[in-house]
Amino acid sequence: MNITFKLDVLKPHSPDNELIGRTLMNTEGVTYVQIKTDEIDQKTTSIFLTVKGTEDVTLDSIKEILESMNCALHSVDEVIIEK
Amino acid sequence: MNITFKLDVLKPHSPDNELIGRTLMNTEGVTYVQIKTDEIDQKTTSIFLTVKGTEDVTLDSIKEILESMNCALHSVDEVIIEK
Amino acid sequence: MNITFKLDVLKPHSPDNELIGRTLMNTEGVTYVQIKTDEIDQKTTSIFLTVKGTEDVTLDSIKEILESMNCALHSVDEVIIEK
Amino acid sequence: MNITFKLDVLKPHSPDNELIGRTLMNTEGVTYVQIKTDEIDQKTTSIFLTVKGTEDVTLDSIKEILESMNCALHSVDEVIIEK
Amino acid sequence: MNITFKLDVLKPHSPDNELIGRTLMNTEGVTYVQIKTDEIDQKTTSIFLTVKGTEDVTLDSIKEILESMNCALHSVDEVIIEK
Amino acid sequence: MNITFKLDVLKPHSPDNELIGRTLMNTEGVTYVQIKTDEIDQKTTSIFLTVKGTEDVTLDSIKEILESMNCALHSVDEVIIEK
Amino acid sequence: MNITFKLDVLKPHSPDNELIGRTLMNTEGVTYVQIKTDEIDQKTTSIFLTVKGTEDVTLDSIKEILESMNCALHSVDEVIIEK
């Protein structure tokens, strides 16, 4: 079973997209991360974040990693689960 | 024989999309669940819900699960059945 | 030889899309049914109905099934026949 | 060698699209017929007609069949011939 | 090596698209001909003509065939050559 | 390693697109040439030129060939290199 | 594990797109480079740069190469990492 999350995330300028991507990829079960910059404001950047992985990947685990990097989950646009 | 339902659903903010998705995936015969957030209002969120599975998956069984999570089936946009 | 019909159908709110789909799938030769809701009015719903099957599937047989469920064939948008 | 004709045809309300399609499919060499309704007027319907087949299928033979059903070839939008 | 020509051609109403297509297909090396009607005027019709074939197919040979049927090459929209 | 160049080129009416294409295809390493007419002016024609080949194909070698035919490289729209 | 970077880069007119592409391709781990010209100003050109490679390819290593050619990384539009 695989799960995909498409998320809106608000982040400070640092960490950059690459660090967020590599950190998420190091999480157990994650197989794909895509980060697209949406809007750059003075202090923050909003990004579209897609994370795919096995069913062990939970929104809670993603949120925890994001928060440890000072990023805030703004909304969950899409969840796909498939056998 | 496989069946696909594309549904409009109105839900309270909790349960979140992930919980709805995982709960539906645990239903006998369901092989795919997609949840896209449509509109977020103050107390409710309307979502587009796609459920695919074997012919045993019925709209009634989906509706029952949704209602057990305080979600209301608003309309059935599409039904696909294929051999 | 396979045949596909794309139809405009006017139906009362009941039977619902699922029942129409399952009933059509139980017809000899039918291999695929898709029902998309077009417009919901106070007493009726107009739907786009696609039916695929072997050459034995005729518009007359589909119309008969639809009428037995109080649905009226409004127009035939497309017919595809292929060897 | 295969040939495809995409045609504009004007037809009376009867024969219906299905009868035109099945009649054309019974012609030697025809392997595919698609009929899309374009515009329905009071006495006539204009349709987009696609006919694919072997090189033996000629526009003359299609025109003859159409005329035998009181349909008039209005224009030839596209011809594709491929080895 | 294969070559594709996409051409604008001006033709009298006769010869029709089918005859132009079949004549071009009878040319050494031609493997595909597509003719789309662009605009029909009182005395002439402008068509989009695509001809694919081996490297032996030249624009000169196509032009010669077109002119022998009273068709005039108006412009060369695209040339593709691939190994 | 393969390289693709997408170029804007300004050419006199002669040489025609076919001659430019065949000349470029005769260059060592070139495997694909596409020429699309962009704008035809009184004395010149601007074309979109795509050239694909092995890594030996350089912009300098393409420019040299174009200039030997009185064509001027106007701009480099895209370069793709892939292993 | 593969990584893709989609970047906005500001460069002087020289080096040209080809040199930037070939230089990046010579970097350890890089398997694909695409450079599309976005806007040409009097002294600078802004380009869209896509670099794909193994996980060893870092944004820092790309930035260093770009800066050695007097190009400035303007923004990171997208990062994709996949197993």
Image (spheres, coloured by chain):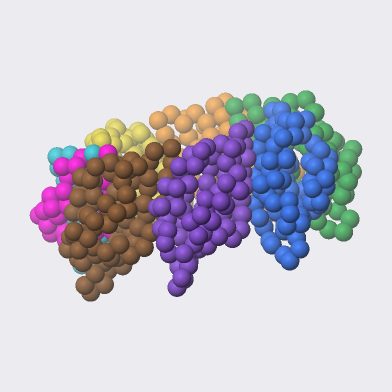
Chain colours: A brown, B purple, C blue, D green, E orange, F yellow, G cyan
Residue A46, horizontal then vertical, whole percent: 29, 65
Q: Is residue D44 above or below residue D82?
A: below
Which residue occupies 59% across, 37% down? B56
Residue B69, horizontal then vertical, whole percent: 48, 56
Q: Is residue F16 visible?
A: no
Q: Nearer the viewer, residue F69 or G43?
A: G43
Residue B71 horizontal side relative to residue A25, left or right: right
Residue D58, horizontal then vertical, whole percent: 76, 32
Which residue occupies 29% across, 32% down? F28
Q: Is residue A31 magenta?
A: no
Residue B53 horizontal side relative to residue E36, left or right: left
Number of marks present in the image shown:
0
Which residue occupies 41% across, 52% down? B19
Q: Nearer the viewer, residue D1 or E60?
A: D1
Q: Is residue C7 visible?
A: yes
Residue F29 horizontal side relative to residue E56, left or right: left
The image quadrant where one finds the N terminus of chain A is: top left
Q: Is residue G64 magenta?
A: yes
Which residue occupies 38% across, 41% down? A2
Residue D7, horizontal then vertical, whole percent: 73, 44
Q: Nearer the viewer, residue F27 or A18?
A: A18
Q: Is residue C58 above or below residue B61?
A: above
Residue G8 horizontal side relative to residue B55, left or right: left
The magenta segment: G54-83
The image quadrant where one finds the C terminus of chain A is: top left
